[in-house]
Amino acid sequence: MGNEWDEYAESWNTDPSVMKYANNAFKSLTAEVDLNSLSVFDFGSGTGALTEMISSKVKQVVALDASTKMIDLLNAKNLSNVLTITDYLTTELINKNQALSQKFDLIIASSICSFLPDYASTLNLLKGMLKSSGIYIQWDWLTNSDNAEIGLTEETIKKALLQSEFSDIKIKFPFVMQSSKSSMPVIMAICKNTKQKI
């Protein structure tokens, strides 16, 4: 399955800033969650920089990305407890795929939500994949405007999480990525699935 992200896969896998972002995300994740023996869904895993760090701590990771080349590079890491899927997340995919129709302890979404065509409806799908009291965490570039080309505002994230009936919502600003041209703050949302939808 071709995807516009395929062309970035090789450079993504070796980019020091991607690794730095993943390291920072992993530190902020482990400060919030004890990963020991959890089942994890990594939504938008890319080449698996964060997946690889998580896999050593958890029981299992199901990693999904729409880019075949990104998933190929993740598969090349030969992580024994990581199952990969190349596709877009839809209700149909969840229903037909046994690995996705299980309920997860933790779902992570790293730097993907601002690229989604419908962030709110995807959150509903993700919430339905969590166990009762399961945890959802996302990281995105922080922006101050809904019209920005990249990133999400704090208000947009909070509103979408509340609409999807997540609870215990916490917003943090765990790190800033610096480049020679700019500094880009990262927003992190942590919440729970404690209101089950009927």
Image (cartoon, grey):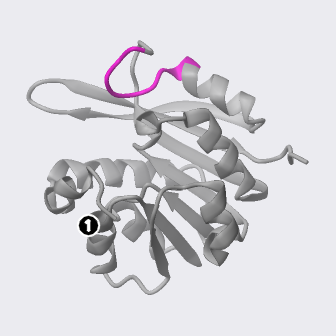
The part of the chain drawn in magenta is: 147-155
Q: Residues within 10 Å of mark 1 (few under 14, many from 20)?
A: many
- The amino acid sitting under disc 1 is Lys
Q: Is residue 149 above or below residue 34?
A: above
| Residue 191 falls in image quadrant | top right
Q: Is residue 153 magenta?
A: yes
| Residue 94 falls in image quadrant | bottom right
Q: Residue furthest left?
A: 180
* Residue at figure coordinates x 52%, y 31% from the top left: 172
Q: Is residue 17 magenta?
A: no
* Residue at figure coordinates x 13%, y 57% from the top left: 11
The location of residue 139, given as percent across then percent down, is 46, 41
The location of residue 37, given as percent across then percent down, is 63, 75
Q: Residue furthest right?
A: 198
* Residue at figure coordinates x 26%, y 72% from the top left: 73
Q: Is residue 157 visible?
A: yes
Q: Is residue 23 above or below residue 111?
A: below
| Residue 164 falls in image quadrant | top right
Q: Is residue 56 above or below residue 53?
A: below
The location of residue 181, given as percent across then percent down, is 10, 25
Which quadrant is home to the N terminus? bottom left
Q: Nearer the viewer, residue 93 or 157?
A: 93
The location of residue 44, given as percent across then percent down, is 43, 54
The answer to whether 27 appears left or right of 197 in the picture is: left
- Residue for badge 1: 69
Q: Secondary structure at mark 1?
A: helix
> Exactly how many numbered labels are in the figure?
1
Q: Is residue 37 visible?
A: no
